[in-house]
Image: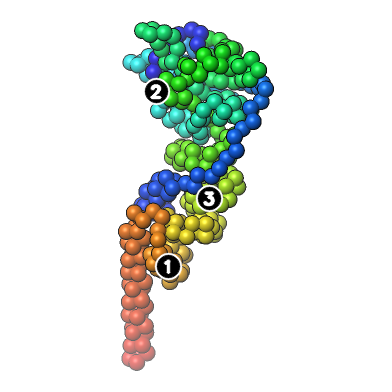
Amino acid sequence: MTCRSGAGRPLSGWLALLMSLTLAGCAHLQTSQPTLPTAVELTETPFFPQRDFECGPAALATVLRASGVPVTADGLSGEVYLPDRRGSLQAEMLGATRRHHRIAYPVQGMADLVAQLQAGLPVVVLQRLGAWPLQTWHYAVAIGFDSMRRELVLRSGTERRLVTDLDRFLRSWKPGGNWAFVALPPGQLPAQPDPQRYLSAVAAAESSLTVSQRVAAYRQATANWPALATAHFALGNSLHEQHMYATAEASWRMAIVLQPGHAGAINNLAELLARSGRRREALTVLDRALAGRLEPESLRPVLQQTRRDLAGSESSAAGRMGAAQRRARGSTAHP
């Protein structure tokens, strides 16, 4: 990605699989369209003028510093700048955001972008600038919008405040698929949050977040979408990693209330019950679920295997108890 120079931890081995599959089934909850402000500008947004083709590190440092991460463009250069490509790829931009304990939430469309600005969140955007054959790809940060003037304000290249015509910006933004994102501290929601985008963004960042940060992110999800089973399931997973077993159990039970066939929550709840000495209750939970429809059905073999494992453990435990009782009776008969 060439920039223009100058202006311009699991409960079981199945947990990761369960999480990825259930996220794919997030409910599409309706969100209202944002009311566009007449004008907004985030004047306190930091500015890092880019060096040569390093618009990626400059743009990323801008939004990370705005979110409270003490970084510099020079410090990020080694993370995202690819000398052979004379630029930064989107994957590196998102990956570096997550490594710095931030959630890279994708922004979709101009109304969404303006809503983020209105909420105080600067937005990284990818543009294609110039005319063929001298076109270049460029990262900038949107910090302001004026609907009356139809203008957008950017931190871009070596310009702290680049004012661009809205139509011109839209033409430059479209070739990259209107790619954009905001960097969220765990526990903060974007403006007009979309549940599937948000939960997917948190899941993508999980390996880089601390357990407490994951709990904070998913707690916000359950507070904002209390009827979304996937949010309660994900919160339960993180609470379990914090050894908060009672609250993890409550979260998984809520997921099952909201979505009775939620295979991930059922499996993890059964394992938790069994490990806490409530094996018969665990088997009952599994039997009830296996008698009905699961979501997704592709995880039925997982639950069946969990039941076999727990039933086998119960049989082994019963066998050991019987042997112990026989030995006790024998010692009484033959002192």
Q: Is residue 321 above or below residue 141?
A: below
In primary-sequence order, the first of circles 2 and 3 is 2
Position of residue 19 measured from the top left corner of the image (x, y, whole percent): 42, 48
Estimate the spatial distance between the alpha carbons at disc 2 and disc 3, rounded to whole Å.
33 Å
Q: Is residue 16 above or below residue 258?
A: above
The answer to whether 63 appears left or right of 330 in the picture is right
Q: Nearer the viewer, residue 112 or 91?
A: 112
Which SS class for mark 2?
Answer: loop
Q: Nearer the viewer, residue 63 or 296?
A: 296
- Which quadrant does the C terminus fall into? bottom left
Query: For the residue marked with disc 3, what is the amino acid?
Result: Leu
Circle 3: is it few (<14), some (14-19), or many (20+) Cα within 10 Å? many
Q: Residue at x 44, y 38 (%)?
A: 204
- Amino acid type of disc 1? Arg
Residue 244 image label: none
- Which label sits in the foreground, 1 or 2? 1
Q: Earlier in the sequence, mark 1 or mark 2?
A: 2
Q: Nearer the viewer, residue 325 or 103?
A: 103
Mark 2: give few (<14), some (14-19) or many (20+) Cα within 10 Å.
Answer: some
| Location of residue 140 in the rendering, given as x and y in whole percent from the top left corner | 51, 18
Which amino acid lies under the numbered mark 2 shown in the image of this protein?
Leu
Which residue corresponds to mark 3?
Answer: 228
Secondary structure beneath dot 1 equals: helix
Instruction: For label 1, count other residues whose C-alpha is less than 10 Å away and answer few (under 14), some (14-19) or many (20+).
Output: few
Q: Residue 288, which numbered label?
A: 1
